C-alpha cells in the first residue's frame, strides 16, 4: 500500500539478490546442507521440508512432483490487530490471536509442498507500539497464525520494506526466524543477501525463491547497505535466477511487488517485464503483489504469471470491495527429465475478507460449498467469486488451462 504522497513510480535502480532459508510449519528445526550438483561462489542455504508435505509423485507416471502455493499481501491495519485482540480476549487470553482470522485456508496451505506468503508490512516488537498506514509497524503475532496454517516462507520485498528503517527491517527478519518462517526479499547482511535461497521438498525437489519490489515509497536505501532490500532490475533478477539454478534449484519462483494500485489489469511495464523474465530458462513462475486487487493470470513463454494475487488479509480504513478479494495460486510442477520440471496443473483459489460479524479470511469455494451460510452471505460470496473469476480470466487464463475453483 503506497503513501499517497508517493505515486507508483517507474522501476528504479538495482539491488542484489536477497535470500535466507526456509522451514516447514510442522517440521523439525532448520538444517543446513552442502551445495548441490552445481558449484556456486556462495554456498546455498537449504532446508528440507517434511516428507509428507505436498504430493511427492505423479500417480500416473511415478515422476516427482511439487506443488507451490502463493498468496496476496499480508497487510496489517489497526482494525486487524483490534480483531486479533478481541479473538484472544474471547478465549480468556491477553494479547493478539490471528488464528481464527486464518482458519478457513488451513487445508489449502497445508496441502502444498511449499506455501509462501507476502509480508507487506514491517513488524514491531510483540508489545508494540503498532502503527498502520503510511509507515507500518505491525504485530508480529500474525506470524503464529501464518505458521499455524502451514506457511513455510514469506517474501519481504515491498514498497513498505523500509518504513521503519534498518532497525525495523532487521526486527522483521528476526521475528520471522523466531517463528520458523524463512524469508527472501530483504537482508540484514551482505552475506545473507548473496546466499542462494533453496528449500527442499520431502521428495528431494529443490525450490529457489526470489523477491523484488518496484520501490520503497521514496525512502532511500541507507548508505553502505545497497543489499538491504531488493529493487526490481530485470538484468539483476535474471542473474540471480541463474545463480539459483546453478546452486541446484529445480524450480525457481519469483515474487514481484509491482503494478498500479487498484488497477485490475497489468500495466505494460508488468507485461514487458514478465516476457523478459519468463523467457529465461532459470525462472519458472511469477507471483505478483502490490495492486491490492486481483489482476489476470497468463501463460507467457509457456510459464504462468499471476500479475497480482490481491490482498490476503487487510482492512482498509475506507474499505474498497475489490481490495477484499484475493487469490491463492496452486501450481504443480512435474519432473519430465532429470531435474527438468514443467507445470502440469495450475489452480486458483479465490478468497474474500469478510468484514462482519468478525474479520475473517474466507476460502470462497469451500464456503460456497458448505450449507451454513446465510442468504446474504452466500450472495456476497458468490458475487465476489464471480468477480475474481472475471479478473483472473481477462487475458484468457482458463483457455490456457487455469482451473479456478
Image (cartoon, helix red, strand yellow):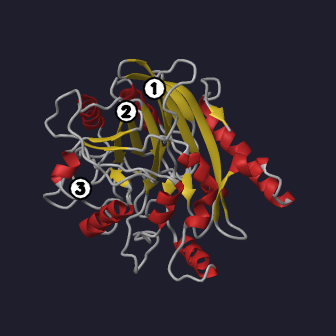
Rate crowding at label 1 as few (under 14), some (14 to 19) or many (20 or more) other CA atoms within 10 Å: many
Which residue is located at x 23 percent, y 46 percent?
15
| Res 373 → quadrant | bottom right
Task: Tell me the number on the disc at residue 228.
Answer: 3
Q: Is residue 157 visible in the rendered structure shown here?
A: no
Cα–Cα gap, marks 1 and 3: 36 Å
| Res 378 → quadrant | bottom right
Rate crowding at label 3 as few (under 14), some (14 to 19) or many (20 or more) other CA atoms within 10 Å: many
Give the SS element for disc 3.
loop
Whichever of callouts 2 and 1 sits on the residue coming sooner in the sequence is 1
Q: Are marks 3 and 2 in contact (CB under 8 Å)?
A: no
Query: Percent x, y for residue 353?
Result: 64, 59
Cα–Cα gap, marks 3 and 2: 31 Å
Whichever of callouts 1 and 3 sits on the residue coming sooner in the sequence is 1
Query: Percent x, y for residue 235?
Result: 26, 33
- Placement of 290 over or under 252, stated as above or below: below
Give the SS element for disc 1.
loop
Task: Tell me the number on the disc at residue 255.
Answer: none
Residue to which mark 2 is pinned: 204
Which residue is located at x 47 percent, y 65 percent?
144
Q: Is residue 389 visible in the rendered structure shown here?
A: yes
Query: Percent x, y for residue 43?
Result: 18, 40
Q: Are marks 2 and 1 in contact (CB under 8 Å)?
A: yes
Query: Percent x, y for residue 227?
Result: 21, 51
- Placement of 305 over or under 400, stated as above or below: below
Q: Is residue 238 left or right of residue 115?
A: left
Cα–Cα gap, marks 2 and 1: 9 Å
- Which of the two marks, 3 or 2, is nearer to us in this view? 2
Rate crowding at label 2 as few (under 14), some (14 to 19) or many (20 or more) other CA atoms within 10 Å: some
Residue to which mark 1 is pinned: 64
Amino acid at each position: 500500500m503506497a503513501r499517497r504522497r508517493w505515486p507508483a513510480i517507474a522501476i528504479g535502480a538495482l539491488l542484489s539478490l536477497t535470500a535466507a532459508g526456509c522451514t516447514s510449519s510442522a517440521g523439525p528445526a532448520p538444517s543446513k546442507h552442502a551445495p548441490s550438483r552445481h558449484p556456486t561462489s556462495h554456498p546455498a542455504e537449504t532446508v528440507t521440508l517434511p516428507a509428507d508435505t505436498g504430493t511427492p509423485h505423479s500417480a500416473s507416471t511415478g515422476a516427482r512432483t511439487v506443488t507451490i502455493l502463493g498468496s496476496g499481501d499480508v497487510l496489517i491495519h489497526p482494525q486487524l490487530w483490534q480483531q486479533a485482540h478481541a479473538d484472544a480476549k474471547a478465549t480468556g487470553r491477553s494479547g493478539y490471536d490471528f488464528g481464527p482470522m486464518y482458519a478457513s485456508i488451513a487445508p489449502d496451505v497445508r496441502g502444498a509442498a511449499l506455501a509462501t506468503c507476502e509480508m507487506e508490512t514491517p513488524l514491531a516488537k510483540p508489545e508494540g507500539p503498532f502503527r498502520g498506514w503510511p509507515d507500518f509497524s505491525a504485530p508480529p503475532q500474525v506470524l503464529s497464525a501464518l505458521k499455524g496454517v502451514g506457511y513455510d516462507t514469506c517474501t519481504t520485498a515491498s514498497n513498505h520494506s523500509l518504513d521503519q528503517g534498518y532497525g525495523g527491517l532487521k526486527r522483521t527478519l528476526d521475528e520471522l526466524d523466531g517463528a520458523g518462517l524463512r524469508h527472501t526479499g530483504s537482508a540484514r547482511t551482505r552475506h545473507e543477501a548473496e546466499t542462494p535461497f533453496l528449500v527442499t521438498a520431502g521428495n528431494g525437489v529443490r525450490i529457489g525463491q526470489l523477491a523484488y519490489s518496484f520501490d520503497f515509497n521514496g525512502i532511500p536505501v541507507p548508505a553502505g547497505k545497497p543489499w538491504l532490500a531488493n529493487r526490481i532490475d530485470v538484468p539483476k533478477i535474471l542473474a540471480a535466477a541463474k545463480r539459483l539454478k546453478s546452486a541446484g534449484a529445480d524450480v525457481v519462483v519469483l515474487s514481484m511487488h509491482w503494478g498500479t494500485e487498484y488497477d485490475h489489469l497489468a500495466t505494460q511495464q508488468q507485461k514487458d517485464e514478465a516476457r523478459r523474465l519468463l523467457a529465461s530458462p532459470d525462472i519458472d513462475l511469477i507471483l505478483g503483489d502490490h495492486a491490492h486487487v486481483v489482476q489476470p493470470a497468463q501463460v507467457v513463454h509457456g510459464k504462468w504469471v499471476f500479475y497480482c494475487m490481491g490482498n490476503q488479509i487487510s482492512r482498509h480504513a475506507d474499505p474498497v470491495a475489490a481490495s477484499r478479494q484475493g487469490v491463492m495460486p496452486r501450481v504443480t510442477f512435474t519432473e519430465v527429465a532429470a531435474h527438468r520440471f514443467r507445470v502440469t496443473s495450475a489452480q486458483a483459489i479465490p478468497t474474500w475478507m469478510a468484514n462482519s460479524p468478525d474479520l475473517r479470511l474466507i476460502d470462497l469455494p469451500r464456503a460456497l460449498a458448505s450449507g451454513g451460510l446465510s442468504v446474504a452471505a452466500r450472495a456476497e460470496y458468490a458475487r465476489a467469486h464471480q468477480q475474481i473469476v472475471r479478473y483472473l480470466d481477462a487475458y484468457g487464463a482458463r483457455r490456457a488451462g487455469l482451473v479456478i475453483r
